[in-house]
């Protein structure tokens, strides 16, 4: 509940102006609640309308994407790019291709991205885009034609110093390659810094593929260590089986934990011996299959229908890595009852508002998404930097920088939580630390 009158009035305006955008309201209200002590200490933010401005995107681009499927039928989808805030750098954030995508989803994601990108300490603003296109079940050629059609409109709105998209749900290396190819064809100049997550042969960064999952574990490890714990011998439950989940599995295992689950939107697997990454890689990256196929080579593992059940598997640490609001209060209670003491978010806003409250009230070590999953976008910025330098760094160099950035995000968030009287509340700390850099830049840049 927001008590401060100014913040309350901004929240009401956000709700009036953006009817039905519940995920956006959820993201905004969490940030505004955290900012109460900040606006009270800094009246200049209210005087300059910083909160009204930061909750309204700079612009939203919305366009038709027409493409031809394998049966020679014309298909129409909607494309979007939400350019939310560029006070500290070019708009930066992923593209999501999923049938559930609409403006409300991308506004919540773009809003979160402002604070996440600020937390990395790197000069990147916040944006997000995507389409309601569903890549599932589409042929390579259909995905190619869709990506070409999507970029045929998007290209005029982006650029290496303007707006730099990357991947998200449904957008991985294949899609980024097709999108970059079309950008190149239209522009006729090689501007590799216009997209990140590219293939290594055309300007991609080593360790970008691994970065979000690895970064999540580096952040979580920093949080664990500050509390006298570690990943060693811990049982970990991970949801999702995409890019973030897979590399969280790899790094958590490397740090001594046993990861016993992965999931997709149909169901989840439990492998008490520890989920085998090479098998998952073959299923998801090579065959683009479903997680239940894991049982074909691991008959001792179990498969259960329905994705929510993954939270009923007893664990020490839970890493939600699938999608927003996948972990509700009921699941939070089950996790805690079964002994889970650490939750760290790989996906964007995977825990509902009630679940977050339950974790904080029960003193669970909780790593909020905008801090814990910032490793992907941070490494994207390192990719942009390599593109500008016309060089490529070693895997080790990128990985080491990523680790330093994640440790720094933990330290900054923990320090802000302490400074504002709620030590250990990283939701508050991350929101405040992320906000202040952007707000101060907006103040310095004047009102527009
Ligand atoms: P992928 O497309 O690689 O994988 C997504 C995974 O989540 C799949 O297992 C998918 O299952 C599952 N999933 C998607 N939607 C739902 C749903 N509605 N219900 C249940 N499961 C679902 O995406 P990523 O791994 O890249 O992204 C996962 C999360 O991490 C997202 O929240 C994303 O925003 C966030 N993130 C990603 C970053 C990146 O660099 N890629 C960086 C920071 C955050 P299915 O195949 O059945 O759809
Ligand atoms: O949510 C995210 O931070 C991402 N999908 C990554 C964005 C990026 O620009 O690398």
Image: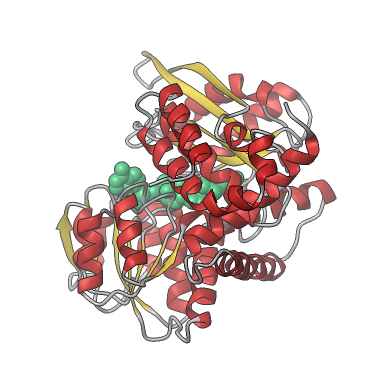
Residue 273 to residue 202: above or below: below
In front of the other: 312 or 358? 358
Quadrant into which the C terminus falls: top right
381 left or right of 142 in image:
right
In front of the other: 244 or 178? 244
11 left or right of 60 in image:
left
Image coordinates of residue 18 in percent, x first then y, are 43, 25
Image coordinates of residue 207 in percent, x first then y, are 61, 61
201 left or right of 235 in image:
right
Total numbered circles: 0
Which quadrant of the view contains residue 404?
bottom right
Residue 259 to residue 82: above or below: below
Question: In percent of the image, x 44 and y 43: which residue is there?
Answer: 29
What's the image's color scheme? Answer: secondary structure
Which quadrant of the view contains residue 140?
top left
Question: In percent of the image, x 21 and y 74: which residue is there?
Answer: 338
- Examine the rendering and report whether any part of residue 173 can be seen: no
Image coordinates of residue 417 in percent, x first then y, are 55, 65
In front of the other: 206 or 312? 312
Question: In percent of the image, x 49 and y 47: which residue is there?
Answer: 31
Image coordinates of residue 265 in percent, x first then y, are 26, 47
- Examine the rendering and report whether any part of residue 323 can be seen: yes
In front of the other: 370 or 154? 370
336 left or right of 256 in image:
left
């Amino acid at each position: 509940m927001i008590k401060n009158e100014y913040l309350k009035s901004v929240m009401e305006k956000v709700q009036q102006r953006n009817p039905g955008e519940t995920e956006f309201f959820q993201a905004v209200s969490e940030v505004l609640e955290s900012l109460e002590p900040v606006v009270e200490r800094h009246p200049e933010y209210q005087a300059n309308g910083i909160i009204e401005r930061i909750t309204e995107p700079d612009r939203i681009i919305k366009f038709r994407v027409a493409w031809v499927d394998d049966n020679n039928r014309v298909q129409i989808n909607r494309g979007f790019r939400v350019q939310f805030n560029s006070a500290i750098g070019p708009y930066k954030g992923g593209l999501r291709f999923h049938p559930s995508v609409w403006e409300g989803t991308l506004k919540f994601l773009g809003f979160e991205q402002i604070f996440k990108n600020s937390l990395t300490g790197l000069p990147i603003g916040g944006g997000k885009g995507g389409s309601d296109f569903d890549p599932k079940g589409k042929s390579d050629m259909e995905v190619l034609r869709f990506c070409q059609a999507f970029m045929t409109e998007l290209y005029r709105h982006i650029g290496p110093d303007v707006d730099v998209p990357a991947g998200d749900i449904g957008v991985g290396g294949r899609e980024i390659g097709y999108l970059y190819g079309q950008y190149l064809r239209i522009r006729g100049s090689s501007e590799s810094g216009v997209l990140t997550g590219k293939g290594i042969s055309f300007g991609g960064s080593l360790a970008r593929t691994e970065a979000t999952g690895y970064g999540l574990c580096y952040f979580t490890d920093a949080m664990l260590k500050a509390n006298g714990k570690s990943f060693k011998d811990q049982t970990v439950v991970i949801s999702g089986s995409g890019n973030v989940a897979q590399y969280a599995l790899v790094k958590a295992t490397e740090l001594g934990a046993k990861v016993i689950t992965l999931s997709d939107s149909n169901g989840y697997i439990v492998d008490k011996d520890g989920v085998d990454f090479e098998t998952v890689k073959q299923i998801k990256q090579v065959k683009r299959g479903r997680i239940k196929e894991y049982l074909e080579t691991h008959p001792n593992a179990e498969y259960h229908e329905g994705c929510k059940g993954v939270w009923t598997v007893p664990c020490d640490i839970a890493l939600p890595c699938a999608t927003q609001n996948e972990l509700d209060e009921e699941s939070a209670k089950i996790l805690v009852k079964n002994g889970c003491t650490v939750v760290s978010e790989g996906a964007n806003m995977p825990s509902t508002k009630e679940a977050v409250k339950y974790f904080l009230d029960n003193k669970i070590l909780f790593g909020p998404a905008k801090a814990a999953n910032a490793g992907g976008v941070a490494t994207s910025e390192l990719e942009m930097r390599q593109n500008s330098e016309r060089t490529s760094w070693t895997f080790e160099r990128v990985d080491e920088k990523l680790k330093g950035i994640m440790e720094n995000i933990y330290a900054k968030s923990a320090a802000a939580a302490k400074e504002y009287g709620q030590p250990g509340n990283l939701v508050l700390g991350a929101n405040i630390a992320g906000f202040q850099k952007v707000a101060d830049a907006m103040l310095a840049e004047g009102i527009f």
